[in-house]
Image (spheres, rainbow, N blue to C red):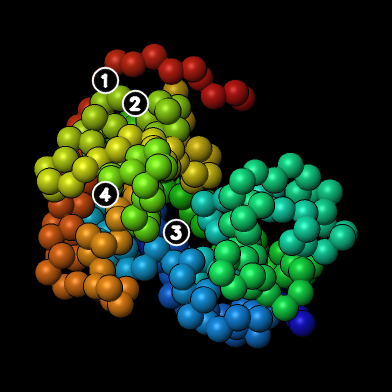
């Protein structure tokens, strides 16, 4: 089937009246399903919706009043996963002509959670046919590449203006199963084991999360995905953390927003963003990025 760019905007950028150094990324809460995606799917839309970080954009919404620029993917995660690299897919999920591009899949890719999600455990393949070159190109050009270009642009502008920039990449998660690292945590803060942010920022976010009276984990089981690993360069004064919030903290059992609990988390998140925007990086030494 032909793929084309369609008029509906794939990304929203909300800038505050008075900018600060914080950029908030919300890559997985999009709820728009382009017609091409629904036509290509072999499963009902309700299965594709399970990929979403349902409604966590409502938690981020107030951050703009706290001085943060918010960048949000409006198209659903089923289009393309902005928190995976362009080379992250299992070869068996793509057309033969593409397989050389995806030769070393990891655990998530083998499970179907690559740059294009391709399967869920209990319903099998999501698409009628393997991802072909036209479909891959359309998805990357329409959402994935513009999203990362916008993040890079906003972070560079913030660093140039303030001397440093902060990226907070916001996600939600299911409850962490028993026996898995981080079990019991309701919030997970990831900095890829110290690689994507200075300790001053991670400590600030951890302390803020602990004020919610919810168990908080660092890097277990989510250490930070492609977004923070790509854009977090503390040696270049760009600090990035990923935050995962247990959906049971703000959704009903039917996966709908709980108004009161959403409001509580949105207030917390805005206060954390404001606090981060006023903080100043400590004098830590980081390796400089390669030229």
Q: How far apart are marks 3 and 2 (CA)?
A: 23 Å
Residues under numbered marks 2 and 1 in contact, where contact means CB atoms less than 8 Å apart: yes
For marks 2 and 4 on the same chain, the one whose residue lies earlier in the sequence: 4
Disc 3 and disc 2 in contact, CB within 8 angstroms: no
Q: Is residue 215 found left or right of 13 in the rendered image?
A: left
Give the number of the disc on residue 282.
Answer: 1
Point out the frontmost of discs 4 and 1.
4
| Label 2 vs 1, first from the N-terminus | 2
Q: Residue under circle 2?
A: 198
Pointer 4: what residue? 186
Q: Please state which of the two labelled residues, at mark 2 or mark 4, is closer to the viewer.
A: 4
Quadrant (top left/top right/bottom left/bottom right) for the C terminus: top right
Q: Residue at 32% across / 73% down in the picture?
A: 255
Neighbour tally class for label 1: few under 14, some 14-19, many 20 plus, Cα within 10 Å: few
Location of the N terminus by quadrant is bottom right
Secondary structure at badge 4 equals loop
State the residue position of label 3.
27
Residue 222 drawn at (x, y percent)? 42, 42
164 relative position to 132: left or right: left
Q: Is residue 88 above or below residue 196?
A: below
SS assignment at label 2: loop
Q: Distance between the residues labelled 3 and 1?
A: 29 Å
Determine crowd level at label 4: few under 14, some 14-19, many 20+ residues with C-alpha closer than 10 A: many
Asked which quadrant contains residue 111, the reply is bottom right
- Counting from the top left corner in percent of width and height, residue 69 is at 32, 54
């Amino acid at each position: 089937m032909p793929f084309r760019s369609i008029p509906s905007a794939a990304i929203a950028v909300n800038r505050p009246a008075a900018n600060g150094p914080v950029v908030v990324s919300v890559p997985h809460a999009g709820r728009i399903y382009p017609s091409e995606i629904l036509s290509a799917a072999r499963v009902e839309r309700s299965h594709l919706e399970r990929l979403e970080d349902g409604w966590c954009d409502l938690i981020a919404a107030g951050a703009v009043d706290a001085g943060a620029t918010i960048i949000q993917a409006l198209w659903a995660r089923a289009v393309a996963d902005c928190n995976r690299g362009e080379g992250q897919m299992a070869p068996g999920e793509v057309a033969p002509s593409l397989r050389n591009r995806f030769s070393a899949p990891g655990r998530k890719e083998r499970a179907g959670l690559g740059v294009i999600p391709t399967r869920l455990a209990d319903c099998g393949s999501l698409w009628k046919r393997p991802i072909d070159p036209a479909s891959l190109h359309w998805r990357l050009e329409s959402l994935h590449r513009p999203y990362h270009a916008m993040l890079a642009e906003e972070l560079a502008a913030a660093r140039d203006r303030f001397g440093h920039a902060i990226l907070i990449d916001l996600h939600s998660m299911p409850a962490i199963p028993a026996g898995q690292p981080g079990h019991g945590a309701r919030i997970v803060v990831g900095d890829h084991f110290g690689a994507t942010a200075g300790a001053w920022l991670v400590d600030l976010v951890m302390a803020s999360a602990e004020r919610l009276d919810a168990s908080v984990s660092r890097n277990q089981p989510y250490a930070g995905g492609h977004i923070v690993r790509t854009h977090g360069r503390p040696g270049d004064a760009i600090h990035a953390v990923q935050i995962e919030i247990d959906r049971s903290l703000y959704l009903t059992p039917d996966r709908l927003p709980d108004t009161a609990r959403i409001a509580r988390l949105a207030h917390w998140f805005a206060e954390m963003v404001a606090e981060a925007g006023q903080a100043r990086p400590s004098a830590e030494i980081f390796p400089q990025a390669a030229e």
